[in-house]
Amino acid sequence: MRENLKSKLTFPIVSTYSRRDALKLGIGSVAALGLPGCTFSERDESKRTEIQLSSGIRADSDEWISVRSHFNLLPSISYLNNSSIGVPPGAVIEAVASGYGMMSEDPIRGKHNLQDLITDSVLPSLGRFFNASTKEITLTRNASVALHLQAVGLVLAGDDEVVITTQEHPAGRNPWSFRAERHGINVREVFIPSPLPPDDEILNLFDQAVGPNTKAIAFCHVTRGGHLYPVKRLCDFAKSRNIVSLVDGAQAVGQFKVDLHDLGCDAYSASLHKWILAPAGSGMLYIKGASRNRFRSSFEPKAGSLHYGVPGTADFPIRASIASAIEFVEGVGIENIERRCRFLSDHLKKILSG
């Protein structure tokens, strides 16, 4: 059985993990985690090199060809489904393997070293990347879990109302159906047409939908169809009415710069295994520090908790590798990525239009 499994592996991993690597990881070195904790086949040797594209690179530049060499994708595959799950670059895959190697050789020390790496490198990397305090970020398995935690955690009672839109993903809609069924809150849906109307019209639709009992509005940053909501204006609108703003950023983070403090939202949910290119099972929940008293943990009795995550043992190697994913995206450049995404989108539309 084992031989059959080994014969199916396209890229065999050979462990070269050592106790010296553990010591490097123990002091929180992202570079140590992303470097030779494991080796891929010879064709993948380039994937352990750092990537650094020029600032302001043209969206149609040949430099983009070099980016592909950092991934394990087969030459015959053109992958177009990051909206579901992204493909981690080789450095991230190696970071995961290094983490599992550490826990396999010395489970207790390995676990603590990875926890230190998450605290000292991953959370600060996310805080810097999204302009947020590390205390405002909770790691989750994905955006779906984060959306559930923020919805179930929002302090609501009686006839309180939440306004959502017709563009929401089921993961953003179902938690509110749960609260309506379990807690008796009212959920109102505002129709948002597709293609998206001008920003002023979207604001007007929300203005017409909210009422005296509305306590929160929940909406996407980017819809599954690629529509970009006027998030900052919606958050300002909500704040002016003492309404909580809850944003689903699953399709936004990693495609363009997201500054959470500038957006002004009270809560933001994101998958890191889509456009950020972290491993499957990576996500985050942001709750603004000043808004913490309006949320309670699903697992603790009082509002204002610093611990909104799901209790229990986490997948430490997966979470520790998020720092390598952020490092890769920063090496390519988030502004470069946004230009490239828009260029490819426009190019496809041009081809489809004939």
Image (spheres, rainbow, N blue to C red):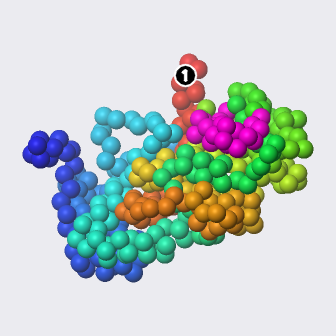
In the image, residue 171 lies in the stretch drawn in magenta: yes
Determine which residue is flagged by label 1. 352
Tell me where residue 157 appears, x and y as whole percent.
Answer: 77, 49
Give left or right: position of 114 versus 18: right
Q: Which quadrant of the figure contains the N terminus?
A: top left
Residue most extreme to the top: 354
Is 304 situated above or below 182?
A: below
* Residue 177 visible in the displayed image: yes
Picture residue at 86% right of the left edge, 44% below the top: 213
Is 236 situated above or below 184?
A: below
Give left or right: position of 301 versus 99: right
Q: Looking at the image, how many numbered discs can be counted on the residues?
A: 1
Picture residue at 23% right of the left edge, 78% below the top: 19
Is 207 situated above or below 109?
A: above
Chief secondary structure of the magenta span? helix
Give left or right: position of 289 versus 19: right
* Residue 234 visible in the displayed image: no
Tell me where residue 315 appears, x and y as whole percent.
Answer: 39, 59
Give left or right: position of 72 versus 7: right
Picture residue at 19% right of the left edge, 45% below the top: 9
Picture residue at 44% right of the left edge, 62% below the top: 312
Magenta stretch: give its range. 167-188
Of residue 347 and residue 184, the one placed in the foreground of this image is 184
Of residue 123 and residue 185, the one placed in the foreground of this image is 185
- Give the quarter of the image for residue 196: top right
Which residue type does callout 1 highlight?
Answer: Leu
Q: Which quadrant of the figure contains the C terminus?
A: top right
| Label 1 secondary element | helix
Tell me where residue 37 appears, x and y as whole percent.
Answer: 27, 67
Q: Residues within 10 Å of mark 1 (few under 14, many from 20)?
A: few
Of residue 62 and residue 76, the one placed in the foreground of this image is 76
